[in-house]
Every structure is written in structure tokens, then in C-alpha cells.
Image (cartoon, rainbow, N blue to C red):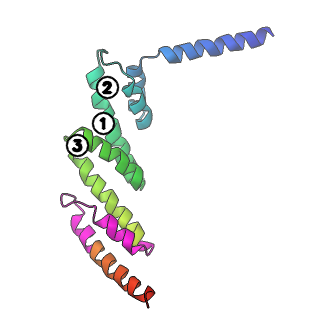
């Protein structure tokens, strides 16, 4: 019985320490470990009156951008778009985010095209903006998808 009480006390003490941890320090630790989702959630808990609040806000944007880049590099296009759109909307200084969003839509269009989903490939290709580095490739893919979708539709209507 005594061992159970000690274990309970130790667990409660650990819980109190975690609850009292400074969110900025916890965010910095997660940031240094490149654990972007954890860094984001910790920095978001930093009080506006905290000495390093402005830095925490900057690190949130950096973490969101880095999470988007990591997801892009891993081929997780939808996750990448989610993170990168967020940082693009929050801070115009992250110009690379907009290009990566377009590139992710292009990559999703390529996957759809390879699966024979030409209408979806066309839809995704048309989302790629003129400012994206893959715009010309997206236009070429959209033209091919449009022709194949039309041919597919003609065959199915016969």
C-alpha cells in the first residue's frame, strides 16, 4: 500500500512539473529537436505578456513553414499544403511557401494523372498559379489531362 502512495505522489509531482513548464522553453526545446507540431503547440501557449512573446510568434511561423517543407519533401502533399497555406496567409515574407503550395498541387495532379484520373489531374493542374515555378509543367499536364478526359468521356458516351 505504501508503494502505491509513493508512486501516486511521484506521478502527481511529475504532472505538476510538466504543467508548470514555461511554454516558451518547451517550444524552444521542440524547435531545436525539429519537432514542428510540438513546437507550434507550445509556442501558441506563450502568454502575450511573456518577455519572448514576439519571438514565439516568429517561431510559430518558422515551425509551420518547416513542417510544410518537411511534409513536401516526404511527398505528403495535402499536409504540406495545409501548413504552407497557413504560413502564406499569416506572413507574406514566406514567399517560398506559395511556390511550394503550387508545386504540391502539381505533384498531386501528376499522381492523379498517373492513376488515370484525368478530370482530377486537370482540376489540380488548374490550381497551380502563374507565380509557381512549376506553372509551365502544370499547363502541359492540364492540356494532356483535358484531351484524355475528353477522349475518355467520348468513349463512355458511346
| Residue 46 percent across, percent down from the top left | 36, 21
Q: Position of residue 10 (x, y in %)?
A: 65, 13
At which x and y percent is residue 67? 38, 42
Total count of labels: 3
Give the distance between the C-alpha atoms of the residues marked 3 and 1, in whole angstroms.
9 Å
Residue 94 numbered mark, or none? 3
Q: Report the span colored magenta.
A: 114-140
For numbered disc 3, what is the local secondary structure?
A: loop
Farthest residue, direction top: 2
Which residue is disc 1 drawn over? 62
| Quarter residue 114 falls in | bottom left
**Considering only order in the chain, which callout, 1 or 3, is on the residue closer to the N terminus?**
1
Residue 47, image quadrant:
top left
Specify the label residue 71 is tagged with.
none
Q: CA distance from mark 2 to mark 1?
A: 10 Å
Give the residue displayed 18% in from the left and 57% down from the top. Answer: 131
Q: Nearer the viewer, residue 11 or 150?
A: 150
Quarter the N terminus occupies = top right
Q: Position of residue 122 (x, y in %)?
A: 33, 70
Q: Which residue is mark 2?
A: 56
Whether residue 53 sits left or right of residue 92 in the image: it is right
Amino acid at each position: 500500500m505504501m508503494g502505491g502512495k509513493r508512486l501516486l505522489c511521484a506521478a502527481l509531482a511529475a504532472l505538476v512539473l510538466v504543467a508548470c513548464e514555461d511554454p516558451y522553453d518547451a517550444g524552444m526545446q521542440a524547435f531545436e529537436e525539429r519537432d514542428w507540431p510540438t513546437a507550434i503547440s507550445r509556442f501558441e501557449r506563450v502568454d502575450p505578456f511573456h518577455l519572448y512573446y514576439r519571438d514565439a510568434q516568429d517561431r510559430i511561423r518558422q515551425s509551420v513553414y518547416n513542417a510544410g517543407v518537411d511534409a513536401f519533401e516526404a511527398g505528403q502533399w495535402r499536409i504540406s499544403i495545409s501548413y504552407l497555406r497557413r504560413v502564406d496567409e499569416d506572413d507574406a515574407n514566406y514567399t517560398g511557401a506559395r511556390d511550394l503550395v503550387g508545386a504540391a498541387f502539381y505533384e498531386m495532379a501528376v499522381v492523379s494523372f498517373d492513376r488515370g484520373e484525368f478530370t482530377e489531374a486537370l482540376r489540380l493542374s488548374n490550381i497551380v498559379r502563374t507565380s509557381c515555378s512549376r506553372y509551365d509543367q502544370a499547363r502541359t499536364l492540364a492540356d494532356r489531362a483535358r484531351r484524355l478526359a475528353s477522349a475518355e468521356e467520348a468513349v463512355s458516351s458511346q
